[in-house]
Image (cartoon, rainbow, N blue to C red):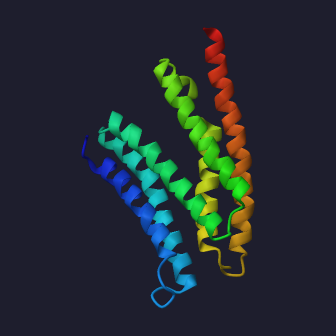
Amino acid sequence: MDFNLPNALTWARIVMIPLVLAVFFLPVEVLSPHHQNVTACALFVVAAVTDWFDGWLARRMNVTSAFGAFLDPVADKLMVCAALVLLVWLDRCNVLLAFIIIGRELTISALREWMAQLGKSRSVAVSFIGKLKTTAQMTAIPLLLFSDDLLGLPIHKIGVVLMWVAAVLTLWSMVYYMRKALAVLNEK
C-alpha cells in the first residue's frame, strides 16, 4: 500500500463516513437537531472536497498509484451509499431514488470490474455524464443533510429536486456505460 498525502485524504474521507452518521445518534442535549444537520452537512462537504482534492493532488505531485485508483472510487461509493441510507432513515430522501442510485453504483462498479478483466476498462472510463451525475449527488446530499431553510431558501426542497435530477442522470449514465460495454462485447 502506497502511503502519500492523496491516499491519506482518501482514508480520511472513509473515516468521515461514520462521523456523519454518528452525528444523528447523539442525544439532543449534546447536539440539537439543527446542529446535527449543520455538522453532518459540514462533514459531508469536507469529505466531498477531499474527493476532488486528493485526485488533483495525486496528479500534481505525480504520486498516482494503483492502490489510490482503487481506493478513491470505493471511498466515493461508500460515502454516497451511507449518506443515502441515512437520508432514507431520516425520511429526507425517497427510498426509490436511493435504490436507483445505489443500484447503479453497484452495477457500474461490477461492469467496470468485468471490463477490466477483459482488458477493456477504458471503454467504461468516467464520462462527462458520470461527472454531472456525481456533481448533482454531491450537491443534493449536503442540502438534504442540512435540510433547514437558509436565508429564506427552501434548502430541503432544493435538495429533493436535485436528488431527482441526480436519479435521472444516474439512469442516463448507467445506460451510457452499458451501451459502451455492449459495443465492446459485440466486437468479440
Name the residue nearer the viewer: 75 or 55.
75
Q: Is residue 28 above or below residue 146?
A: below
> Measuring 55% from the left and 54% from the top, which residue is drawn there?
81
Relative image position of residue 118 (x, y in whole percent): 50, 18
In the picture provided, is 15 more to the left or to the right than 162?
left
Q: How many marks?
A: 0
Residue 113 percent location from the top left of the image? 49, 29
**Image quadrant where residue 16 sits:** bottom left
175 lies above or below 95: above
Residue 89 lies, with reference to residue 6, above or below; the image says below
- Rendering coords of residue 7 (x, y %): 32, 48
Which corner quadrant holds the C terminus?
top right
Residue at horizontal 72%, vertical 81%?
152
Residue at 51% x, 48% y: name it: 77
- Snapshot quadrant of residue 60: top left
Picture residue at 40% right of the left edge, 38% below the top? 70
**Relative to residue 63, is residue 5 depicted above or below?**
below
